[in-house]
């Protein structure tokens, strides 16, 4: 019989970082529907185009910049210098975040992984000279991360893809491996966020010409037959409807088992004018940690 997980939730790590849900938001239930580009039958070449477009949007918005201090503090607390990013898409926010997480005295080595790795995008990210970013070329299931991949685990804008049982399996796998894990989501089950997905879907019409490497197929699937914008719209709305609220994340964590872990759940919203970022962070409980 394993020991129950030590469950500590900081809904207010900092008072300004946590939000109270309005009654209207609380009434919106999570739905487990499919996102097209995550399905195994979705053409891999088109999936790469979608993840390239998503990457372009993340780079333009610099959406995860506000959580850099939060992530830095957890890496410092766990003394982690190796990071294993799961469900990385075309690289996620690491091109910008890596610059913020590399003080003079310490270098972080970041490994990108994905179930359907966008190898061309990963290769381009790796060649950025100021980063220490590499990629794992083979498929990695976030619920069964290979034991050889050791390091602080991260997930950005991807935890909502998984139904509760699989989401729990991702966290349980981290516990079984004794690895810390941090999950961040910029989507929310809120009418305003869902409405913004329509503007998000218009982004390829403006910025596709600037995405590198240039490909004629990307232009065709944007301007001639707008498959990319339509998939971004559909998957964006579904992403919002699937995103877990902090209360639901606590329910998932509460059913885990194994060694004692400290969990922090909340919504980070310090940056003015930015949407809150939902986070779930877990690390092995150490002697002397708060109870």
Image (cartoon, grey):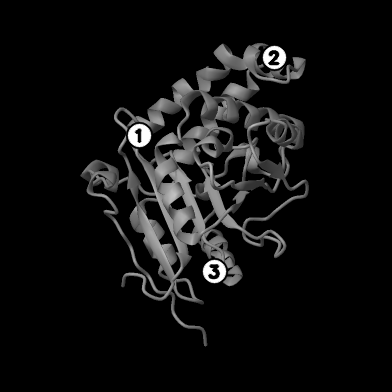
Tag shown at residue 275: 1
Secondary structure type for disc 3: helix
Residue at mark 3 to residue at mark 1: CA–CA distance: 30 Å
Q: In this view, does 39 lie to the left or right of 199?
A: right
Q: In this view, does 285 lie to the left or right of 86?
A: left
Residue at mark 1 to residue at mark 2: CA–CA distance: 30 Å
Residue closer to the observer: 259 or 217:
259
Can see residue 2? yes
- Residue 271 percent location from the top left of the image: 32, 33
Secondary structure type for disc 2: helix
Circle 2 packing at 10 Å, graded few (<14), some (14-19), many (20+), is some
Residue at mark 2 to residue at mark 3: CA–CA distance: 44 Å
Task: For marks 1 and 2, give the one nearer the viewer.
Answer: 1
Can see residue 31? no
Q: Residue at x 44, y 35 (%)?
A: 65
Q: In which quarter of the image is residue 145?
A: bottom right
Tag shown at residue 145: none
Q: Residue at x 44, y 41 (%)?
A: 68
Q: Which residue is drawn at 71% across and 15% down?
A: 220
- Residue 51 percent location from the top left of the image: 64, 32
Q: Name the residue under label 2.
A: 219
- Residue 67 percent location from the top left of the image: 41, 42
- Residue 241 percent location from the top left of the image: 43, 42
Q: Name the residue under label 3.
A: 175
């Amino acid at each position: 019989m394993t020991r129950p997980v030590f469950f500590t939730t900081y809904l207010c790590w900092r008072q300004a970082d946590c939000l109270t849900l309005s009654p209207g938001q609380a009434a919106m239930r999570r739905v487990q529907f499919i996102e097209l580009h995550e399905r195994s039958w979705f053409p891999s070449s088109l999936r790469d185009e979608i993840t390239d477009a998503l990457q372009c949007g993340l780079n333009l918005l610099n959406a995860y910049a506000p959580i850099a201090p939060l992530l830095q503090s957890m890496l410092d607390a766990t003394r982690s210098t190796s990071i294993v990013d799961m469900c990385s898409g075309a690289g996620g926010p690491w091109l910008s975040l890596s610059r913020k997480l590399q003080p003079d005295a310490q270098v972080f080595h970041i490994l990108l992984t994905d179930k359907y790795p966008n190898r061309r995008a990963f290769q381009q990210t790796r060649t950025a000279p100021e980063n220490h970013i590499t990629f794992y070329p083979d498929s990695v299931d976030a619920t069964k991360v290979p034991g050889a991949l050791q390091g602080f685990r991260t997930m950005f804008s991807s935890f909502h893809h998984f139904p509760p049982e699989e989401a729990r399996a991702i966290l349980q796998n981290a516990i079984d491996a004794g690895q810390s894990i941090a999950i961040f989501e910029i989507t929310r089950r809120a009418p305003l966020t869902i409405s913004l997905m329509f503007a998000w879907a218009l982004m390829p019409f403006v910025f596709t010409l600037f995405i590198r490497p240039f490909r004629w197929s990307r232009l065709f699937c944007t301007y001639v037959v707008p498959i990319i914008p339509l998939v971004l719209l559909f998957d964006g709305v579904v992403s919002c409807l699937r995103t877990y609220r902090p209360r639901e994340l606590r329910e998932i964590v509460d059913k885990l088992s194994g060694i004692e872990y400290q969990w922090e759940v909340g919504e980070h919203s310090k940056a003015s004018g930015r949407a809150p970022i939902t986070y779930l962070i877990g690390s092995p409980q150490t002697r002397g940690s708060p109870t």
